Image (cartoon, rainbow, N blue to C red):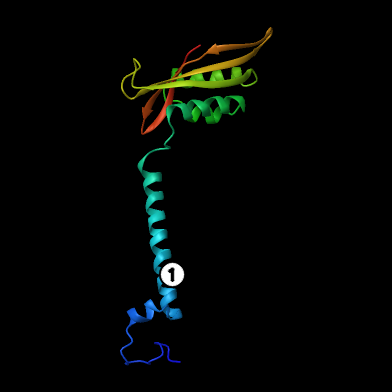
């Protein structure tokens, strides 16, 4: 049998006819597979580049607050520091909160999020949270709204409410 079909080369058997009959050569299959893999990998790399370069860490205000409470429970105040705006009073306030409440924070829940509706401007947000703390008399639940502003495409905590 000839590699181009049953009629042999030059007998009117075009590549299209061979494809219709499923008679791909191994070399042709390898080219098609390589082309598909190249296309898929190019699309993947492009999407990853857009995600990484284009839009900061991508966390919503609620996700930043969630991380704050998680890191506080884990007593990882360095990670808490990464979530806070580079402003001395805010930074000190959140680091002190982390140190003070790491062993007292029992639970937290996020009740809602408002973006732009705060007195800090349109690039601000308020995340309404409720925290439960251990106290001498047992556990007590408090409302604890958290305020954030957008800095370099990332949401950052700006001040702690007591």
Horizontal and vertical percent position of residue 58: 42, 36
Q: Is residue 54 above or below residue 99?
A: below
> At 44% from the left edge and 74% from the top edge, which residue is drawn?
30
Q: Residues within 10 Å of mark 1 (few under 14, many from 20)?
A: few
Q: Is residue 23 above or below residue 63?
A: below
Q: How many marks do you count on the picture?
A: 1
Q: Which residue is mark 1?
A: 33
Quadrant of the drawing holding the N terminus: bottom left
Residue 35 vs residue 79: left or right?
left
Element at badge 1? Answer: helix
> At 37% from the left edge and 28% from the top edge, which residue is drawn?
150
Horizontal and vertical percent position of residue 27: 43, 79
Q: Among all residues in the image, which is located at the extreme top? A: 137
Horizontal and vertical percent position of residue 72: 58, 24
Horizontal and vertical percent position of residue 135: 66, 10
> At 33% from the left edge and 22% from the top edge, which residue is drawn?
116
Residue 71 figure quarter:
top right
Residue 5 figure quarter:
bottom left
Residue 155 figure quarter:
top left
């Amino acid at each position: 049998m000839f590699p181009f079909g049953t009629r042999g080369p030059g007998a009117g058997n075009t590549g299209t006819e061979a494809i219709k009959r499923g008679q791909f050569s191994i070399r042709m299959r390898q080219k098609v597979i390589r082309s598909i893999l190249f296309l898929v990998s190019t699309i993947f790399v492009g999407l990853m580049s857009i995600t990484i370069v284009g839009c900061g860490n991508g966390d919503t205000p609620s996700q930043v607050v969630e991380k704050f409470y998680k890191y506080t429970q884990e007593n990882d105040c360095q990670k808490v520091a990464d979530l806070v705006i580079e402003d001395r009073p805010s930074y000190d306030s959140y680091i002190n909160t982390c140190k003070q409440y790491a062993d007292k924070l029992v639970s937290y829940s996020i009740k809602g999020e408002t973006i732009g509706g705060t007195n800090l401007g349109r690039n601000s947000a308020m995340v309404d949270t409720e925290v439960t703390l251990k106290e001498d008399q047992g556990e007590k639940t408090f409302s604890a709204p958290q305020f954030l502003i957008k800095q370099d495409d990332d949401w950052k905590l700006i001040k702690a409410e007591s």
